[in-house]
Amino acid sequence: MKKNLIRIAALLISALMLTSSLSSCRLHKVSFDAEHNQYVDGRTSIRYTDAPGCYEPVAIGKEYAKIYYNRKASVTLHEMGDMDPAQWLCEEGKTVFYAEGVTLPTLNEMAPEKVHLCIEEAVTMVVTTVTDTADIAALIDVWQNGEEVTYTGLEPTLNLRIKFESSAYPGLYYSLIYLEYGDGSKVLYDRYAARCIDAGDVLLEYVG
């Protein structure tokens, strides 16, 4: 009886290893071209570039490729929802990769229909979602045309992630940081572009 159980267990382990091996073989192999700072799909020859950190995947989809450094696979690339993997990919750290020939949309070009205000720690929790078109337009206008101020780096009293969502780019967020301080100041901040804008009361209705 024990021998039979051992045989069955061995067969199951072998089957799992074979499935994992086949799955790995099906993934595209991507190499890093340091000269051009691009990631090249060896199967399709498509070249990808990593996007600025303000672009994030809405969700991390199924595995699509592995990035190889010095012939060793180190990073898994995933699909981004219904977006074409020949144009868009992401990795678990939320970095977005876009293909050569694809133009990253500006916030205005994305034409967001929703804005999620989130607390982002170990997991992301949506506090509230803005759907009013006038409020979304006002928020975009503040970010694009508001007064630039110095980022102080002080401890905020409120720290939220603002994730703009658009049906035109269903797997992509445009993400900013909203900060409030003890002196009453409020800012929108993009840490990757080092851009900090006076937010005023543009979100007062939603964050009190």
Image (cartoon, rainbow, N blue to C red):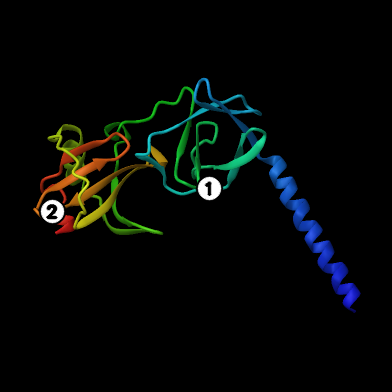
Kindly identify the amino acid type of the residue bearing the numbered disc 2: Leu
**Number of labelled discs?**
2
Foreground residue, 132 or 55?
A: 55
Outermost residue on the left side: it is 183
Outermost residue on the top side: it is 35
Location of residue 157 by image quarter:
bottom left
Q: How far apart are the alpha carbons under marks 1 and 2? A: 35 Å
What residue sits right under mark 2 in the picture? 204
- Name the quadrant of the C terminus: bottom left
Foreground residue, 147 or 145?
A: 147
Location of residue 112 by image quarter:
top left
Q: Earlier in the sequence, mark 1 or mark 2?
A: 1
Helix or strand or loop: what does disc 2 sit on? helix
Foreground residue, 121 or 145?
A: 121
Q: Residue at left 18%, top 56%? A: 206
Q: Residue at left 74%, top 46%? A: 22
Q: How many C-alpha atoms fall within 10 Å of the one at disc 2: few (<14), some, or many (≥20)?
A: few
Outermost residue on the bottom side: it is 1
Left/right placement of residue 92 relative to residue 153 reads right
- Name the quadrant of the N terminus: bottom right
What residue sits right under mark 1 in the picture? 61
Q: Residue at left 69%, top 44%? A: 24
Left/right placement of residue 165 relative to residue 187 reads right
Q: Residue 53 appears at what percent x and percent y?
A: 37, 39
Q: How many C-alpha atoms fall within 10 Å of the one at disc 1: few (<14), some, or many (≥20)?
A: some
Q: Residue 76 appears at what percent x and percent y?
A: 58, 43
